[in-house]
């Protein structure tokens, strides 16, 4: 994990969050958010062992003792930074899933729209930085997986399951277990993306992302759709976008 990751080299997303806190009533909150945003960047870039509180403090433009005042130690800061980033990822994914509330009759189109957005979330540079950091540190800190699952993965799957259950109640889908169906749809959407993205080192073109989403929805509707031969089935050449 040493060296700059492509995902965060520019640091654009963190620049705003990591700006110096203004002297106001929100100063303490602003400083905490700046520390968390900067800590995530540094941990993702350097790895836990190589990252130092001195570097985090310098890049967050706070005093080192301010980090200790807020978080106590480096391990607590790591967990808090990952939790904050998981919350950010959850919000982005839930916004995509929530679009299923506007379903107006064309289930395939609605699922493909949400599927594309979920694939985009998965391919997001910060999402990849979070996964790489988890992969690198999970042996030393196995509870990091629980943090990410509890704050992001599980709520997203539950929200998707809720939407699918409503479609089933309306007669648009047939399924016994919406939670299992949601897990399977998520797996269809993201299962091939680690290889396609080369663990976040390759940018997957939008057309390829959309092809993955269409193929995933096509397979899902063949399994759970009420139409035995759903319209718009993909041809093999369309479904198999280049890796």
Image: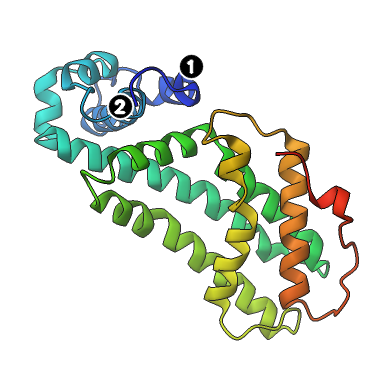
Q: Is residue 186 above or below residue 240?
A: below
Q: How is the image coloured?
A: rainbow
Answer few, some or many: residues within 10 Å of disc 2's Cα (few below 14, many 20 plus, some between 14 and 19): many
Relative placement, left or right, of 149 versus 168 is left
User: Nearest the camera: 137 or 121?
Assistant: 137
Locate the C terminus by quadrant: top right
Horizontal and vertical percent for residue 92?
A: 53, 46
Secondary structure beneath disc 1?
Answer: loop
The quarter holding residue 77 reads: top left
Relative placement, left or right, of 92 versus 61 is right
Mark toward the start of the polypeptide (1 vs 2): 1
Q: Which mark is residue 59?
A: none
Horizontal and vertical percent for residue 231?
A: 90, 67
Work out how far the residue at label 1 is from the one at label 2, CA to CA, in angstroms: 17 Å
The quarter holding residue 1 reads: top left
Residue at 58% across, 60% down: 186
Q: Is residue 89 above or below residue 159?
A: above
Asked if the residue at tag 2 contacts the one at tag 1, i.e. Cβ–Cβ closer than 8 Å, the answer is no
Q: Which mark is residue 10?
A: 1
Relative placement, left or right, of 170 versus 201 is right
Residue at 30% across, 57% down: 146
Q: Which residue has dot 2 on it?
A: 34
Answer few, some or many: residues within 10 Å of disc 1's Cα (few below 14, many 20 plus, some between 14 and 19): few
Residue at 30% across, 53% down: 147
User: Nearest the camera: 195 or 85?
Assistant: 195
Horizontal and vertical percent for residue 5?
A: 44, 23
Q: Mark 1 or mark 2: which is in front?
A: 1
Horizontal and vertical percent for residue 63?
A: 14, 17
User: Nearest the camera: 197 or 67?
Assistant: 197
Secondary structure beneath disc 2?
Answer: helix
Q: Is residue 131 above or below residue 162?
A: above
User: Nearest the camera: 13 or 183?
Assistant: 183
């Amino acid at each position: 994990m040493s060296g700059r990751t492509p995902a965060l080299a520019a640091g654009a997303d963190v620049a705003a969050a990591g700006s110096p806190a203004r002297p106001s009533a929100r100063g303490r909150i602003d400083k905490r958010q700046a520390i968390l945003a900067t800590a995530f960047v540094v941990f993702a870039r350097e790895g836990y062992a190589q990252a130092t509180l001195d570097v985090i403090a310098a890049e967050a433009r706070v005093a080192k003792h301010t980090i200790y005042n807020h978080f106590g130690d480096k391990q607590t800061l790591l967990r808090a930074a990952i939790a904050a980033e998981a919350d950010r990822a959850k919000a982005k994914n839930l916004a995509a899933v929530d679009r299923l509330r506007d379903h107006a009759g064309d289930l395939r189109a609605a699922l493909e729209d949400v599927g594309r957005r979920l694939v985009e979330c998965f391919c997001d540079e910060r999402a990849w930085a979070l996964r790489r950091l988890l992969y690198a540190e999970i042996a030393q800190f196995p509870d990091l997986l629980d943090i990410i699952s509890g704050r992001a993965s599980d709520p997203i799957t539950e929200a998707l399951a809720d939407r699918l259950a409503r479609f089933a109640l309306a007669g648009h889908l047939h399924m016994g277990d919406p939670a299992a169906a949601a897990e399977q749809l998520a797996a269809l959407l993201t299962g091939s993306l680690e290889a396609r993205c080369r663990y976040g080192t390759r940018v997957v073109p939008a057309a390829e992302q959309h092809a993955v989403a269409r193929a995933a929805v096509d397979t899902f509707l063949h399994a759970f759709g009420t139409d035995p031969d759903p319209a718009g089935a993909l041809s093999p050449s369309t479904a198999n976008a280049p890796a």
